[in-house]
Amino acid sequence: MTIQESATMPVKVRRATKSSWTGLAVMTPILILLALGPYILGRGMQQNLVILFSLIVLGTMWNLLAGYGGMVSIGQQAYIGIGAYGLVYIADTLGIDPFLAVPLAVIIAGVLSLPISFLAFRLSGGYFAIGTWVIAEVVKLIVEQMDVLGAGSGVSFMAVTELSPGRRIAYVYWLSLIAVVIAVAVTYLLMRSRLGLGFTAIRDDSVAAGSLGVRVTRSKRIVYVIAGMGCALAGSMIAANTLRVQPESIFSVEYSAFMIFIVVIGGIGTIEGPIVGAIVFFALQQWLSDFGLWYLVILGLLAIIITLVLPRGIWGLISGNGKIRLFPVGYRLVNPLERFSLIKEKAPVGDGGAPNA
Amino acid sequence: MSALLEVRGLSKRFGNVVTAEDVTFDVAEGTALGIVGPNGAGKSTLLSLITGVLPSDSGTITFQGRDITKERAPSRTKAGIARSFQIPRPFVDMTVFENVYVGATFGGGFHGQVGYEAAVRALETTGLMHLSEKPAGQLRLLDRKRLELARALATNPRLILLDEIAGGLTEKELPPLVDLIRGLRDSGVTVVWIEHIVHALTSVVDELMCLALGRVLAIGDPHEVMRSPEVIEVYLGSTFDIGEAS
């Protein structure tokens, strides 16, 4: 017995599922409705939604890092800060159009993340987590030494203040909505690609992935750079929304805590999870804002409870542990059983019964 | 017969622990080499050195006439070296089919439809087709072992390294797996197979190598190796030594 000849039935692999088409049908009108936001919603609500959008981008990026790349970083605030400062510097000091400055700031973050990855990747596991935090603190300390970036007191974002507040807020809102769509779409397309299959394999077992030909370190580096760019995108959204960038707040490790919370309660290792997590986190943030410091205690408790009760997060509960997928990235063989029984009929009789799965 | 794999003076230490000491052997194309030896003899380490998971301290590894000593694991896989792990390492949250497709597309370089077909062939060969849509984490031991084999086969290997693939299986489960490995060898895939179940091993392999404390104790005809006084001493003596030490 050697490798058998291909059976007569062709091998067919399906990438989309019924639920993904339903999902698309549901998501499209929501997206259209959100795009009409500035015509429907007040300015305060729009600014709040920008916060939500930035949280979705951050959660999606952290999930890419930890959920797919197996890299638990608590230093992504480095790139949030680079994106925020990058936008302000490029738009205000260099005088480039603010809406062009956003992609430029994102590219700068990507360029910086590559050499940083060589430093961070010398560490793994818990050491990697601490190392990324240290790197973020170093970036903050460097920024605090730079007078051109306002040193310790920070900078204000002036370029967009020429616009009327209503128009400015609407532009930032649309920009952030586009950012969410880009972040989720890039993640989805990446995970559907061959590269994404490698990431998923690395997530489950990096040693086995390496021995099957997946280039583990290179794949992780790609994820790290993309996540750095995505966090910079969120950072520039935050800067454009608040019009003020201060090193203590933009480089705060709190962002990492939020990202972890969003991904853990939403459902790690799924594209939908961080979106759900960000919405839940945002709602909690709004409700609990009156409780002062207790709000962090409650968030912490909630994270612990959800981790214990729902290890796959809220999305895991909604989707019935992955039965529903709005963003299908898997590979499903069409009718594997029929194909199998076809082969069994051809095989000599007497070895085992018919498969009954 | 030309040697597909040539290992020369391979050594590896972890601190004071010697796991490979001047290991030298050849594996001819299309043959099967069995490896036996007591626990801690360095059998699994040797496979890790050949696949490139571990870097060697000294010595050379030549595959298909090319020195691959400095190459990393993924490029060795692409060159045609595949392995199965002693303790199966499935991608638990991926389906069986996806597990095997990873091997086909990354290791074998088969993309898209060609890759799907390569994966299906590997599943059919190993008898896993009826489980293709199951998450790999739900498989029982025998099927996990088969999955190890299927993934390795999907990389289209010229050399396959099996690390106790039959370990932990029942007497009833053993013969089909042994037939499968013999079939592989007969189809032209070169096999290096570590196994404690010696009768399973000797029914397939052309040559047998016995390792002890990282050294090659004996290599040659399977029955002669198993009868050689050194090998018998290591096998029977080792349990005695361990008993005294503890």
Image (tube, rainbow, N blue to C red):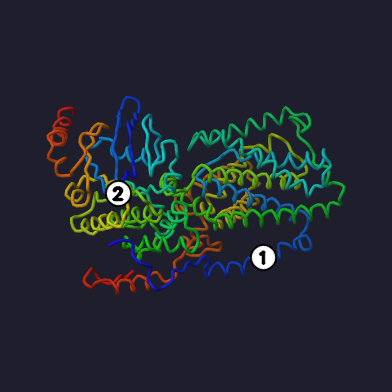
Coordinates of residue A83 in the picture (x, y in percent): 70, 42
Residue A251 sits in quarter? top right
Please name the residue shown 23% across and 36% down the image.
Answer: B211
- Relative vertical location of residue A351 with respect to residue A168 in this rendering, above or below: below
Q: Going by the image, does B200 lie left or right of B91?
A: left
**Crowding near pointer 1: few (<14 within 10 Å), some, many (20+)?**
few
Left of A34 or right of it: where is A123?
A: left
- The answer to which of B179 and A305 lies nearer the viewer is B179
Camera-side mark, 1 or 2: 2
Q: Residues within 10 Å of mark 2 (few under 14, many from 20)?
A: many
Q: Residue furthest top?
A: B16
Q: Amino acid at mark 2?
A: Val
- Image disc number at residue A30: 1
Q: Chain for mark 1?
A: A
The structure residue drawn at horizontal position 36% and vertical position 55%, both measured from the top left corner, is B153
What residue is disc 2 on?
Answer: B191
| Residue A213 point in image, percent of width and height | 45, 48
Q: Amino acid at mark 1?
A: Ile
